[in-house]
Amino acid sequence: MPKSKGGLPYRIVNLATEMFARNTGFSGPEIHRLFAEYTDVLGPYVRASGNPSRWQIFETGLASLSVDDQRRFLLELCRYDGPGSYNRPSDENIAKLRSLLLEGAAPGVMAASDRLDQLDDWETVRRSWDAALDKVVTDPEGAITATRTTLESVCKHICDERGVSYDDVAGDLAKLYKASAAAMEIAPDQHSERIIKQILSGVATVVNGLGAMRNSLSDSHGRGKASVRPAPRHARLAVNTGFAVASFLIDTHLEKPMKDKR
């Protein structure tokens, strides 16, 4: 698939250009102002005959950005609710562009959300799920926090629906995962086959790592001067691994019937 100079697939660049710099979107001066927070490649807008068209200005600005900044910029435009000289892009196109951008930032996560839609009264999980996706490029620290929150909420919802008690105050992700996994008989010590036991142990290790990652790299705690700030790649790692675990738990919850306690 062809890509723009900055690396995003051509279909994303083309769709964004159609939305924001052709029949809908922004004027030339507005496009210059929007890109000014990201790059000085466009410079100030000067009215003169022979100026580039709006779509040329837009694609020039976009191509000057890194792939991560391209995604961040376009996601912000999808949420933009300020003034514009042209009509706002359709909700359908905004949803389509956002989906394409998030698939590139967190492969497979969008497809996994279909399973979440099969569950009733899981709105809390859906909110943190969407927050993690929205922030994976624009706010890496927040994405790590939201991913941990999502996984914690998934575990609690499973425990609630399966009648398993847990400590709602301590917020120990490892313990919550252990409780929900045991309720569905996917804890490592509930299996004797070596390869299955090894895989399930690996999942538990990932959960422990996400808890530690959230404590050291997310926005959930104060920072010292020498603290390390996560890059988008760290957020993608957290989101992709965290949602893989969350999806596995949801799949299991849907596919393994709850035992009758009568």
Image: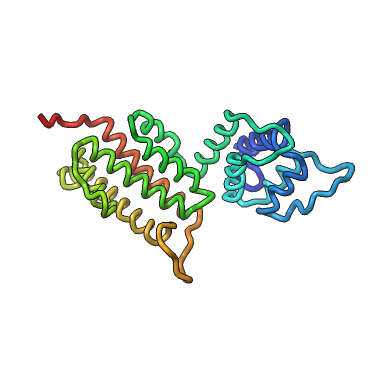
Horizontal and vertical percent for residue 182? 19, 43
| Quarter containing the N terminus | top right
**Image vertical order of residue 213 relative to residue 246, above or below:** below
Can you give x and y, in whole percent of width and height, for residue 129 in the image?
41, 41
Q: Report the residue that reaches farthest toward the bottom.
A: 225
Q: Nearer the viewer, residue 67 or 197?
A: 67
Residue shown at 71% from the left, 38% from the top: 84
Left or right: residue 43 versus residue 20 is right
Residue 59 image position (x, y, % from top left) = 71, 43
- The relative height of residue 144 versus residue 113 in the rendered view (above or below) is below
User: By what rule are the colours in the image chosen?
Assistant: rainbow
Q: Which quarter of the figure has residue 120?
A: top left
Outermost residue toward the right in this view? 49
Question: Which residue appears at 26% of the width and 30% of the height?
Answer: 255
Residue 195's x, y, as percent?
A: 23, 45
Which residue occupies 16% across, 47% down? Answer: 189
Left or right: 35 in relation to 222: right
Q: Is residue 216 above or below residue 182?
A: below
Q: Nearer the viewer, residue 143 or 205?
A: 143
